[in-house]
Amino acid sequence: MDSRSLRARQAPIKAKYRDDPSSAAFTLKAEGSLDGASLTCRVSTGQGHAEAGLHPATGGDGLALCSGDMMLEALVGCAGVTLRAVATAMEIPIRGGTVFAEGDLDFRGTLGVSRDVPVGFREVRLRFDLDTDATDEQLATLLKLTERYCVVFQSLKSPPSTSSEISRRPG
């Protein structure tokens, strides 16, 4: 897709959101199912199901996906798509490349070994290795705009408010 095609595709959407800001508000949803026998959660995706389970560092067998890895994979996907869209809009040719995400965590917190160790990632790093002839200035702008418009990156950088609840299923 070229810059003109992208703009043409997005123009009516942007106009609608400008004219009716409430039409831009969406609630994205995810769902998983628990089975009584295993330590996994079967997550519904747009492409089928993904089986999430314990990371081997917490006692998992490595056959199920680790949710921490899935979070980094979501970051890679979102950042990669965002970078491609921004590059297209800026008319920066990207012949190819690789997107990397890494996250550091200490599993002592997750396993309750030490209350002094936080649960979750302490640091997340995102990196792009691109095949492009873009100038350093173009790449700096591309990175800045990719960070700005990537939903997952921004959600990690400025965490949203969160809540949780539990209920008993009838019957």
Image: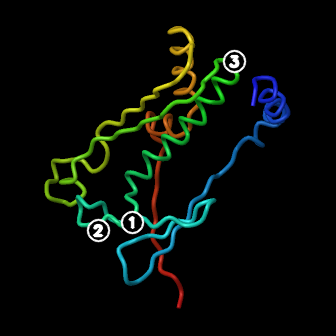
Cβ atoms under marks 1 and 2 closer than 8 Å: yes
Q: Amino acid at mark 2?
A: Asp
- Provide the residue designation for mark 3: 91
- Kindly identify the amino acid type of the residue bearing the numbered disc 1: Ala
Q: Helix, strand, or loop for circle 2?
A: loop
Q: Residue 44 in the image: x percent, y percent?
A: 57, 65
Q: Where does residue 99 sit, x and y in percent of width and height?
A: 47, 34
- Residue drawn at x 81%, y 23% is 4
Closer to us: 130 or 121:
130
Question: Up-down: is 4 above or below 141?
Answer: below
Mark drawn on residue 112:
none
The part of the image, by quadrant, that contains residue 23 is top right
Mark sitting earlier along the chain (3/1):
1
Mark 3: secondary structure: loop
Alpha carbon of mark 1 to alpha carbon of mark 2: how far? 7 Å
Crowding at mark 3 (Cα within 10 Å: few <14, some 14-19, many 20+): few
- Residue that badge 2 annotates: 61
Mark 1, secondary structure of its residue: loop
